[in-house]
Amino acid sequence: MTKPSNFILDTDFTTYKNDAIGSIVFTIPGSISIPVNTSYKASYSTTLGTAGAPSRAFINSSASPANWYVGQSLQVVADGIDSLFGPYQYFYIIYITRTGPNTVTANVQIDNYGFGSGTLTTETTARTITVKLATFIPPFAS
Amino acid sequence: MPADIVKAKNFDLTTDFPLDKVIYLNSGSLNIAASGTGSATIPHGLPFIPLTNLIWSTTPDFSISYMAGSGPAAVDPTLYQLGIDSAVNADATNNVVSFTNFFTSPVTIYYRLYAFEPSDSNADLPMTAQTGDTFTLNTDYNYTKLYMQGKLTLSGSTSIFHGLGYIPQIEVWIGTATTNYPPQQFINLLDTSSGTVIGNVGIYATATTLNFTGSVFGALYLHYKVYLDD
């Protein structure tokens, strides 16, 4: 039994080691036209890190360039136009998946599943999305 | 002499800043029915509510693995973007992992849990690694350099100053009176619209601060770790 908080370096406890860092940058175009009951979807991937590695992610939008959101997903509220109702606030989501042992994928999805809504035209400003990634050596025996 | 942050950041291993220590490890598997849910309640035996993370896979070799809050894409992402939803929470006695399978076929999920000690604890703990023929310190690796950590009581919007001048690696958990959650498994919200929709709930970093806004699941505390590593 040992007090882990008392040690700067300690070999009694498994350590958390850096593996790799990387980023995914993509643009969500402005004024996307999304017919009702459809979605806009896009995916962007990068090769990063050790297979099975734990990872952390920050997600940043040029709409709020100083802020880097912690986590695997970010939902954004934005101003669009509904062809039937006019100005319309809609949501879109950016989320992270792993699509291969070393492949990290950032996905964006904008749904237009409104009740009786018309075609959604998204915000006029294109947004640059940056996903900052880090992976870690798995703290488990292989 | 005070630690030189810039130089320390560039070392693989530095004695100016603590290594982060994994104080709990566990693993297991669950069979989840098609369109079903499953969970495991695992006693952790620790004298505090740990800061637990979850990594999981659909294969035992973890070749493709996901953190809590991430997963494979759904076949039809109309309602859910992910085909399998995952979560972990820790209370005073147990780590609880849970999964929801949105796929139409059963799946076996392999999970691994690892946890850190909260900053307000100073407990005697069983070792998770041993010296001898297994060295846990090795200069082949770049070790995390823990710059600051703490536990804050939340009251609306909260900011913590780190002042590093860049976006450092940050690990956070939100806590209620009885449970700690890794908030990565929840959805952060950024409200860029001209009107107020449902507020702006989020955990985000700037080059100088770590910020919590809004109210997430009755959160009372924010446990945070800021590393020099970027």
Image (cartoon, coloured by chain):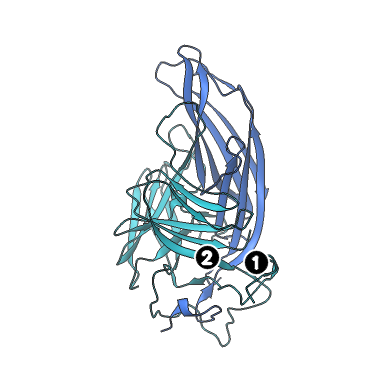
Chain colours: A blue, B cyan
Q: Are marks 2 and 1 in contact (CB under 8 Å)?
A: no
Quadrant for the N terminus of chain B in the image: bottom right
For disc 2, the chain is: B
Instruction: Label 1, secondary structure: give it.
Output: helix
Q: Is residue A48 visible?
A: no
Q: Measuring from the top left, give residue B117's x and y in whole percent.
A: 43, 69
**Residue under the point 53% across and 69% down:** A139
Residue A14 is marked as none
> Around disc 1, counting alpha carbons within 10 Å, would you say few (fewer than 14), some (14 to 19), or many (20 or more)?
few
Residue at mark 1: chain: B
Taking the image as shown, residue B90 lies to the left or right of residue A124, namely left
Residue A5 versus residue A45 in the image, above or below: below
Give percent across and percent down for residue A53: 57, 60
Label 2 is placed on what type of residue? Met
Return the disc, 2 or 1, that comes first in the chain's sequence: 1
Provide the residue designation for mark 1. B5
Q: Is residue B177 left or right of residue B28?
A: left
In this rendering, is residue B219 above or below B12? above
Front residue of A11 and A8: A8
Tell which of B199 and A131 is nearer to you.
Answer: B199
Horizontal and vertical percent position of residue B110: 45, 59
Please give the residue where the numbered disc 2 appears in the rendered image. Answer: B148
Q: Quadrant of residue A85?
A: top left
Answer above or below: position of B148 versus B139.
above
Q: Position of residue A88 (x, y in %)?
A: 47, 20
Residue B84 versus residue B148: which sits nearer the camera? B148
- Distance of label 2 from label 1 (alpha carbons): 12 Å
